[in-house]
Image (tube, rainbow, N blue to C red):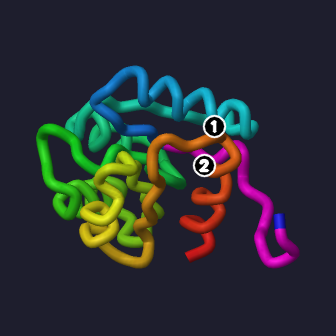
Amino acid sequence: MSKFEKPLDRNMPILVVDDLAAMRQITRHCLTQLGFKNIHEAEDCSQALELLRSTNVGLVISDWQLPDTTTGALVDMFRTAGARAELPILMVAPVTQRELAQTAKADDRTELLIKPFTAEILEQRIQQTLAE
């Protein structure tokens, strides 16, 4: 951690959204390795929206392409449901779709994480997402 980065709140509620259970498990494992304890999971937009309405999520880590929505609509729904226009969102995309995902990045509070990733890379991207 550089002297300009603030320490991460390891108790911050994080929502992991992915239609693939294996990806949710990998992301949860990395977050647990990093010391995060308050991790919620959703397999689709409707579950994610329900959790955002009932939990004070500090960060969303989501697959950038869920079967039931587009990326831009996904970001809008997450921020509306959480009633937080500045909700930090980390969108996860495969390396094969890096350029397409980069152009679809919604705004300055949305960052991109390319698969595959390690816990260390995830931590760096979380730091960057929360620093915006």
- Of circles 1 and 2, the one toward us is 2
User: Label 1 to label 2, Cα distance in Å?
Assistant: 8 Å
Q: Report the magenta stretch's main SS.
A: loop
- Where 120 falls versus 44 (above or below)? below
Q: Residues within 10 Å of mark 2 (few under 14, many from 20)?
A: many
Q: Does the CB distance between marks 1 and 2 fall below 8 Å? A: yes
Would residue 10 be counted in the magenta stretch? Answer: yes
Q: Earlier in the sequence, mark 1 or mark 2?
A: 1
- Where 48 falls versus 124 (above or below)? above
Would residue 93 be counted in the magenta stretch? Answer: no
Point 55% across, 34% down: residue: 39
> Which quadrant, please, contains the C terminus?
bottom right
As drawn, the label of residue 31 is 1
Q: Which residues are magenta?
A: 2-14
Point 60% across, 49% down: residue: 122
How far across and how far down the image is residue 102, in percent?
A: 33, 68
Point 62% across, 41% down: residue: 118
Q: Amino acid at mark 1?
A: Leu
How far across and how far down the image is residue 131, in percent?
A: 62, 73
Q: Amino acid at mark 2?
A: Leu
How far across and how far down the image is residue 112, in percent?
A: 43, 60
